[in-house]
Amino acid sequence: MSTNEVKSSKKPERDMTFALVGNPNCGKTTLFNALTGLKQKVGNYPGVTVERKEGECFLPHGEKVRIIDLPGAYSLNARSPDEAVLRDVLLGRRKDTPRPDRIIIVLDASNLERHLYLSTQILELGIPCILALNMMDIVAEQGVEIDVDNLSKSFGGIPVIPMQASHRKGLVEIKHCMSKPEIPAPKFKVAIPEEINDGLEKSWKRLRESGVLANESSLLEPLYLLSDRDPTHYGIQDKQLDAIQDTRKELAEKFPGWEDKLVAARYDAIYVVTQRTIQRPDENDATLTDKLDAVFLHPVWGWVTLLVILGLLFTMIFKVADGPMGWIESFFEWCGTWVSGRMAEGDLRDLIVDGVIAGVGGVVIFLPQILILFFFIGMMEDTGYMARIAFMMDRLMSRVGLNGKSFLPLLSSHACAVPGVMATRTIDNPKDRLITILVSPLAGCSARLPVYLLMIATMIPSDEVPAMTKALFLLSMYALGVGGAFFFAWLFHKQLLKGEGAPMILELPSYKSPALTAVLWQMWERTRIFIRRAGTVILGISILLWFAVTYPKSDNPDPSVAMEQSIAGKVGKIIEPVIQPMGYDWKIGIGLIASFAAREVFVSTMSIIYSVEETEEIEPLRDRLRAEKRPDGRPVYTPRTCLSLMVFYVFAMQCLSTVAVVKRETNGWKWPLFQIAYMTLTACLGAFLVYQIGGMMGQL
Amino acid sequence: MSQPTRLSDLEQGSSAVIESIPTGNASLTRLRELGLLPGTRIQLIRRAPMGDPIEISVRGSLISLRKKEAELIEIQTI
């Protein structure tokens, strides 16, 4: 049996690195924020979409240390990409993140036994550790007593700091402890049953011979690698992967259930520790969480609460965001006018005003909605309500192969797919997460609304038709989007993605009051990432699209003629035969091309093509569309053309912001390209069917 | 002592002791890691409004699992 000695000698060339580790919901991030004072860098671990957070902290004697907030995990036997990253960093298997010099293990002291499971796994690694016993206020409330000194002694005298990170209690003590030059190495070892130990040693030798493990690796490394069944977690060569798979098979055949025996052994060892350190009262009073859940998860009141909260969310998005969106619009208009007044007439001015300012403005206008969504999602995550939504919606989502955690991302996408896609990080099962990302843009986002409203107005112009009829058309478009999302989720689950469907095991954390600063910070962080990722792509494409509708220049002063002669106009005419079976002419073709980056651009493009001055009112453009005739004299915008166009926009991707975010969240171009392809094909097919079936039913 | 029964059949609000959990199943191993071991006392807090999943209390934390997994776990009601 090899022991794993880690020298705590400081390397002078870099600051000492502390890693924060712990279960989800242990208050780790709160402590991270308190230590770093929000001086942090957020990014991704290379090759995986796991959030990487790093910050700086100054200790009492002025020394600067690095702090890494490692992903929350229940065990080093990884079951998700997050847990695999934690394992690999702690075992020193990731080249991008050196093995930390010291570890701060954050535990929810009110749930000590469970949290000690991961903690003791980490103590065994031999890296100097500090135990941060968080949520001591709840422990006191429950009348539980924890013998801190005894706990420290149980693990070889390592520092144990009682804390309440949310109120900065214990912060001075832990910083003081962090600045100590020497921390006793943890001494704790769960005995591995001898026959399993022999098996592991054989595997260890084998994996070292095949080059999977370095020669100096400890026996714990094969233990945690072999317990991970997901080959996508390792990021190593196929040959080495085969070695791991073969070794695992061999071990499982010789010692069936070896992992389960180790779990039991660890809990036995933890029991010995908790027996002598924890004193519980005989009777537990109902906690705040029990009382709140009695309402929030009630068969009737649970739904009422959910509807009220979601109603509030959508009211905020569509009513409160309205004001700021107007200001942003005015601001960009003002910018355009300002530049126009100060630059000489010419292509460069047009490029800046019509290309850059209008293009960027068209995306930035959605920022208020995106910010509100990020805020609500952050609040729901932070308070613990998010897990309750997942619990309530799991049954419904499981019918199409997803789980309850997919509900909120899909729902958010009804305002904007960008925060929806970014919120899928909470889905730990990669397969469910990918499917949710793929179908999220099918939800009827707010950029589709102007298109729907224009088409419905064109289709049913009369005010005599009850508003309900129009609303019904609008609703059916949203229903079609939801139906499409569920259908494709089901299809992808069945056909596209193989892999073990992970079980839906979900912890329902205790409710807590939200840390507003942290929620606002996270909201800003996510928005910044979105602006940075989407900004560059959108800027580039806006310029390209501007170029396509402007060049080659025409001498004709009529902008609609100029557009006809432009590249976009020519492409529109080239694709006319293709889009004709959907009921479209080349003018609509230009609209489809121009709105590739953002759906709502369709409306403004139509205004230009038909030389209708852009106003707040929908009527002038509506009347112009209704008057439009085909060469043979039949009207273009018949009900079936309008319906076909709406169906096209239900399914078509037509949103570069989403493409940019999906690329970030899936780590490459493969999935966003697949997404554009399947959505555009479905859009064309749907529009074609609507137009053709409409024709067969005798519609114009 | 009553007959062993399945966790999925436990009445809302009732407590039980886990009798056995099949070994070698990855999802059940994760439940073990969350503290569901033979001999552990658990309580069924509630079923989700649509009947599945279920919420149980184990070692001071609240865990939700689907019926599919709960059906595999044998318990002894108290």
Image: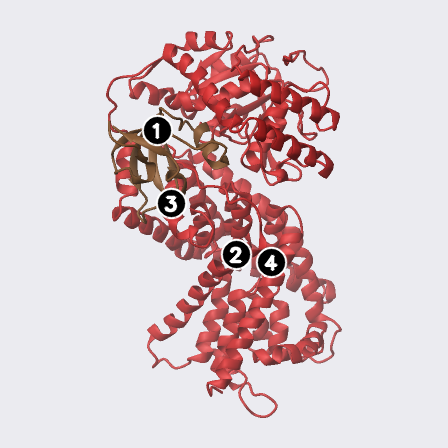
First of labels 4, 2 by sequence position: 2
Q: Which chain is brown?
A: B
Q: Which residue is under mark 3? A: A389
Query: In which chain is the residue bearing label 1?
Result: B
Three-letter amino acid code of the residue under disc 1: Ile
* Contact (Cβ within 8 Å) of mark 4 with mark 2: no
Q: Secondary structure at mark 2?
A: helix
Q: Position of residue A303 (x, y in %)?
A: 30, 49
Marks 1/2: CA–CA distance: 40 Å
A624 lies above or below A431: below
Colour of chain A as rendered: red
First of labels 4, 3 by sequence position: 3
Q: Is residue A624 left or right of residue A162?
A: right
Res A675 label: 4
Q: Residue extending furthest bottom?
A: A632
Q: Which residue is under mark 1? A: B18
| Callouts 4 and 3 in the same chain | yes
Closer to us: A628 or A561: A628
Q: Position of residue A392 (x, y in %)?
A: 35, 46
Three-letter amino acid code of the residue under disc 4: Gln
| Callouts 1 and 2 in the same chain | no
